[in-house]
Every structure is written in structure tokens, then in C-alpha cells.
Image (cartoon, rainbow, N blue to C red):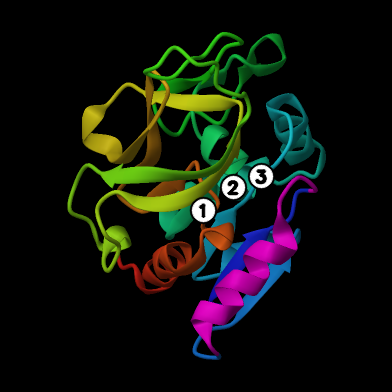
Amino acid sequence: MDLVIIDYGMGNLHSAHKAVEKVAAGRKTVAISSDPEVIRKAERVILPGVGAMRDCMAEMTNTGLLPVIAECLQNKPFLGICVGFQALMQTSEENGGVDCLGHFQGRVKFFGKNLVDSNDQRLKVPHIGWNQVQPTQDHALWQGISAAEYFYFVHSYYVEAKQPEQRLASCDYGAIHFDAALVENNVAAVQFHPEKSAAAGLQLLNNFLNWKP
């Protein structure tokens, strides 16, 4: 199998699968699986995620997939999406504080209840909809994607990474400047949903399919 989307019960599986299949265009095989052996044998993997962090981490534990996820983080191209991105950090403020996978140094923080824009107008939380994302380094995953391209977001919590060199792209929501994407060696992660981000999102998924870290 060329690519497996990890099914631990908390991901936007089918829309992600459909989008990856579209860019694969029959060139590569794509599957959804919760079978550790299928995941281990995949050339590359995607870790999706929706919902509360506490529930996501609990399901990774309950399904017995934590060991295989840890293996994949070490030995193959890996892409985290949305909560799958946040789960790669050390901790999250959500649900009173949750320990995460700790692959990237940093934490996941709440936007807050009183977020405002530059005109002091209240902004809605969760941050839902299209927003501009600015790449912060030249990287193969951003090939063919314009600077300040729009991507689709759905999140109430955002990533604050500790190591600037891992930042792939950033975004602003009101006064908060947050990490929209991180990358280090074979592991990349994005806060936005590429499968819902039209041509730019499909380009990123295609880049991931061809990525040779």
C-alpha cells in the first residue's frame, strides 16, 4: 500500500480519502485502515483528527495504535491534519490539559473567548472558514502553492511551537499569530484541512504523495 489514512475512530476519514485518491489518480494506492500491520507496511501515512483532544488521545490508546503511530513518526513520510497536527505537540490546554504525542516541542492553546480583530470587533471561536496562510520556508510540500494562499480551517485551539526552524507556514486570526504547519525530517503537519481547501489543498496532498524527505 502506498498510503494509509490511520483510522482510530476520530478522523475526517472519507473526505480525506476521496481527496488523496483524486490526486493519486490511480498512480498510487490509498486506503483507510486501523490494522497495525497494514499501517506498518504503508509507504506513507496520514493522521487525521476531529473532535476533542482528550477523546482523540484516548482512542489512539484504546485502539492500540499508539506504538505503530510512534513507529511511523520515525521511519516514513507522515502528515498530521487538524487535531492530528495538534496531537503531535507535547500538551494541549483542551479538556483541562492533555498530554499529547510529544513529537514536536510546544503546546496547543485556546484562542480565548474575547478574541478581536484590528477594529476591535469580536471574532468567533472556533475559527471556521478560509484564511490566508503564509509559508515561512522553502519546502517541497509547498511547491506550486502561492504565498498567502487561502486554506480552510475549523479549530478553537492553535499550535505554538518552540522551535522556529520547524515552522513551515503561519496564519493570523485576530491578534493571534499561530503555526499553521510544521515540518521536521519525515514528519509534517497542518492545522487547516487540505481535503477541504480546493486546488491549494489538493496540491499540498499531491506534494505529500511525492515527498522524499
Q: Estimate the x, y position of residue 212 in percent, counting from the top left.
A: 30, 68
Residue type highlighted by circle 3: Gly
**Circle 3 sits on which residue?**
49
Residue positioned 72% across, 15% down in the render: 95
In the rendered structure, the answer to whether residue 181 lies left or right of residue 111 reads: left
Q: Which residues are magenta?
A: 9-25
Residue type highlighted by circle 2: Ile
Residue type highlighted by circle 1: Cys
**Circle 1 sits on which residue?**
72
SS type, badge 1? helix
SS type, badge 3? loop
Image quarter in which the N terminus is found: bottom right
Per the picture, the main secondary structure of the magenta-coloured stretch is helix
**Circle 2 sits on which residue?**
69
**Sequence order check: which comes first, mark 3 or mark 2?**
3
CA neighbours of label 2 inside 10 A, class few (<14), some (14 to 19), many (20+): many
CA neighbours of label 1 inside 10 A, class few (<14), some (14 to 19), many (20+): many
The nearer-to-camera label among 3 and 1 is 3
In terms of depth relative to the viewer, which is nearer, 200 or 28?
Answer: 200
Q: Determine whether 17 is above or below 163 in the image.
A: below
